[in-house]
Amino acid sequence: MRQSVVVGLSGGVDSFVTALLLKQQGYEVIGVHLQLWDDKGKPQLDSLCRDLGIELLRYDGQELFRRQVVDVFVQEYSEGRTPNPCALCNNTVKWSLLLQVADEMRVEKVATGHYVKILPLAGHWYVCKGEDAVKDQSYFLWGVKEKLLMRALTPLGDFTKVQVKKMAQDYGYADLAYQKESMGICFLEGRDYRDFIFHYSGRICKPVPGDIRDTDGHVIGQHTGLLNYTVGQKRGMPVIGNEPLYVKEICTGQNLIVADRKNGLFQHVLEIEQVNLIDRTDLELENIEVKVRGLGLNPAGNANVREIGESRLQIYLENPAWALAPGQPVALYCGNRLLGGGILSSGRI
């Protein structure tokens, strides 16, 4: 009897090729389309699944998505924090819903089109970086629990995006392979996040001007509303003695922004909360690396990590990180292996 697998299908090339590969490996594939945000139904999915000869189910997860992702996104920004909705979705909605569907159907395996690998090591299961360094999505999965990883398949981790597109094209789906990919935050639908928050909150989160102060507490300018600023931003900030200033801190309780020179935004010590770790003994490793962004500006070198309370860690960086904002995800790695992570709560210079 063939083993069954529930595959999350978005209508894009990645999830389609995931289903194709698993079918070729002998799995009985059950496609599940998660309707998360004003979904238009993705009618092309019906024809794609008919072509593959697989069952397609549609699952309404809009209420959970709204509560766990959109509401949190709006609340976090209103408190001067910088959330990552893709990490929120993966860690609290998408994978959990797929597992729920699988359990209801008594299916052991679930699969997604993420460009990561899920591998066993020393009695545990870890997310690891995929072969495509540019498309690697491990950073967004720091909060996925091991009990789910044990049942998950991610075949695209062994391929590059170019190879995946070539597979789709070779099987006669060139239009799917080269269709425009959705970029950015899905529920914003191309809108500015500030405009979205303003309207979603019922105009409660409206911009209120206030002071910009230096690190000594002196008023050096006026801001146009806290939602218009993020930590590390230079645009719209004062210039002192021909030297630009950057947003260092957003203080919602006082409706003010603290500004500093670029060098003042480096941090050597971080604290994170809402921690998820696969194996707590991994904190004893000597070569732990830290990512606070999926790609781009990340602190170089290794870090020492220690527990400071339940679901809280303190991280000492070998080299400082720049312009970190409370609310950002912090992922911990050992080589290509994702150890876990948490949410940045504070930092010290």
Image (spheres, rainbow, N blue to C red):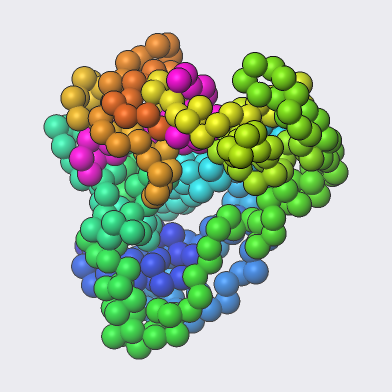
Farthest residue, direction bottom: 172
Residue at 69 percent of width and 29 percent of height:
257
Q: Quadrant of the N terminus?
A: bottom left
Q: Which residue is situated farthest in the front direction here?
A: 241
Q: Is residue 15 visible?
A: yes
Q: Residue at x 84, y 44 (%)?
A: 202
On screen, residue 20 versus residue 324, left or right, reads left
Residue placed most toward the observer, 303 or 216:
216
Q: Is residue 343 magenta?
A: yes
- Whether 112 is drawn above or below 179: the answer is above
- On the image, the x and y values in percent for residue 49 come to 43, 76
Does residue 60 appear to the left or right of 267 in the view shown?
right
Q: Position of residue 334 (x, y in %)?
A: 22, 35
Q: Nearer the viewer, residue 81 or 166?
A: 81
Furthest-left residue in this view: 122
- For the stretch drawn in magenta, the main secondary structure is strand
Total labels: the figure holds 0
Range of magenta residues: 322-349
Residue at point 28%, 78% (across, down): 167
Who's the residue at 80% across and 30% down the image? 210
Q: Can the viewer see residue 343 in this picture?
A: no
User: In this image, 51 relative to 120: left or right?
Assistant: right
Residue 323 position, x and y percent, is: 50, 35
Q: Position of residue 84 (x, y in %)?
A: 53, 43
User: Could you tell me which quadrant the C terminus lies in?
Assistant: top left
